[in-house]
Image (spheres, rainbow, N blue to C red):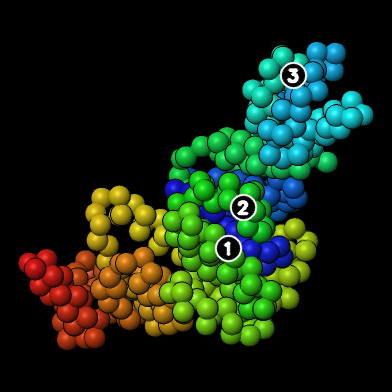
């Protein structure tokens, strides 16, 4: 399963979410790979002790014009959608602007005299690393002065493969690099902030994902500052609010030092673990059946998160079967190798379990 962590603007915390999610899942022994798709400014490696395993160049073909064979017809220039061929017929000037070239080959096809050949040009590098826990981290890095990182991003995602959970730390914005990253994702986590700028860029991201038929959920970072514009928008659009992370100087300090907050904050570590688990189980279940039901256990330990899970289920078209409260008598029954319904039939959680079962039986017969 591929999960893209993206944002409409830079600085919202997408790399914070992606790196800590990767850290928690790898710490639990999950099969997980992190891909830094922000090829123009990759920084995921700053947060991990990692050893480089291999590296390769990403190239594309750029035209070379033989001016002695050129008839100055201008077809190559007119066929180039990227304005990468500078052509002044009256001055007999024709030059390739390599940084603008996308390597599409249209100019070669347009030339009727064979005056155009091609040469490889390096766009950037893809490197594979192994963290100190033995997990893969793939980095895309665009060469300085190149214009488009799309081919480098594609190569990095391909290098990561498809095993387990693949986390894609997306470039900011909604242009081609963002689209190339989320195009490969099964689900998109959008990280935003509760400000007018955050809302504006979130709208752009959501509208772009709609055209791609991509499902998404939202995390509001620094949720206790700003206004309620983002929350109101999510309610109107019925987009699941997966979580809110309040501003915390400890998080900011840890991030600025290149350290992961989930290494020392168990509460946040649990949050990131839960964030991944529900989506992954849901995705697997969808492969076998069109109907998925969800039960929220120990909902009263964090009712705000339980509400967000319920909203996410509604957005996915899944049924919330019920909520089970925390009860120490469940632990008692487990220690006694008995079900809580059998051992304590009259307590609230036992009655709720029976009600869920009865509803399932009625719906199943229908």
The answer to whether residue 20 of the structure is visible from this angle is no
Q: Quadrant of residue 353?
A: bottom left
Q: Estimate the spatial distance between the alpha carbons at disc 2 and disc 1, rounded to whole Å.
A: 9 Å
Please tell me which of labels 1 and 3 falls first in the chain.
3
Instruction: Residue at 56% x, 75% y: name it.
Output: 244
What SS does tag 2 mark?
helix
The disc placed on residue 116 is: 3
Q: Are marks 1 and 3 in contact (CB under 8 Å)?
A: no
Q: Estimate the spatial distance between the alpha carbons at disc 1 and disc 3, rounded to whole Å.
A: 40 Å
- Of residue 330 and residue 195, the one placed in the foreground of this image is 195
Query: Residue 227, percent across and down?
Result: 63, 85
The answer to whether residue 281 of the structure is visible from this angle is yes
Q: Are marks 2 and 1 in contact (CB under 8 Å)?
A: yes
Please tell me which of labels 2 and 3 falls first in the chain.
3
Q: Where is mark 1, residue-wise?
A: 205
Q: Is residue 197 above or below residue 229?
A: above
Q: Residues within 10 Å of mark 1 (few under 14, many from 20)?
A: many
Name the mark nearer the viewer: 1 or 3: 3
Q: Is residue 234 above or below residue 82?
A: below
Please tell me which of labels 2 and 1 falls first in the chain.
2
Q: Is residue 270 above or below residue 158?
A: below
């Amino acid at each position: 399963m591929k999960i893209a962590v993206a944002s409409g603007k830079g600085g919202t915390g997408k790399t914070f979410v992606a790196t800590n999610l990767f850290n928690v899942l790898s710490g639990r022994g999950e099969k997980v790979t992190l891909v830094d798709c922000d090829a123009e400014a990759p920084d995921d490696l700053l947060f991990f002790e990692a050893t480089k395993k291999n590296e390769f160049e990403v190239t594309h073909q750029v035209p070379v014009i033989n001016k002695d064979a050129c008839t100055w017809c201008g077809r190559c220039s007119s066929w180039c959608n990227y304005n990468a061929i500078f052509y002044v017929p009256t001055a007999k000037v024709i030059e390739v602007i390599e940084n603008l070239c996308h390597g599409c080959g249209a100019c070669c096809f347009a030339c009727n005299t064979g005056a155009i050949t091609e040469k490889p040009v390096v766009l950037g590098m893809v490197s594979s690393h192994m963290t100190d826990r033995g997990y893969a981290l793939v980095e895309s890095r665009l060469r300085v002065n190149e214009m488009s990182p799309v081919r480098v991003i594609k190569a990095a995602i391909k290098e990561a493969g498809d095993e387990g959970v693949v986390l894609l730390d997306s470039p900011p914005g909604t242009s081609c690099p963002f689209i190339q990253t989320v195009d490969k994702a099964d689900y998109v986590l959008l990280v935003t902030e509760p400000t007018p700028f955050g809302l504006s860029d979130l709208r752009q991201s959501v509208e772009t994902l709609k055209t791609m038929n991509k499902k998404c959920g939202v995390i509001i970072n620094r949720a206790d500052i700003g206004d309620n514009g983002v929350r109101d928008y999510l309610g109107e659009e019925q987009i699941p609010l997966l979580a809110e992370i309040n501003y915390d100087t400890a998080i900011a300090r840890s991030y600025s030092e290149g350290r992961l907050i989930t290494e020392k904050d168990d509460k946040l570590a649990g949050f990131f673990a839960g964030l991944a688990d529900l989506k992954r189980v849901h995705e697997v279940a969808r492969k076998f059946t069109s109907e998925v039901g969800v039960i929220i256990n120990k909902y009263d330990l964090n009712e705000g998160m339980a509400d967000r899970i319920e909203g996410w289920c509604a957005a996915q078209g899944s049924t919330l079967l019920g909520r089970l409260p925390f009860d120490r008598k469940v632990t008692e029954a487990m220690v006694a190798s008995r079900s809580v319904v059998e051992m304590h039939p009259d307590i609230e959680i036992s009655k709720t379990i029976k009600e869920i079962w009865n509803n399932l039986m009625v719906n199943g017969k229908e």
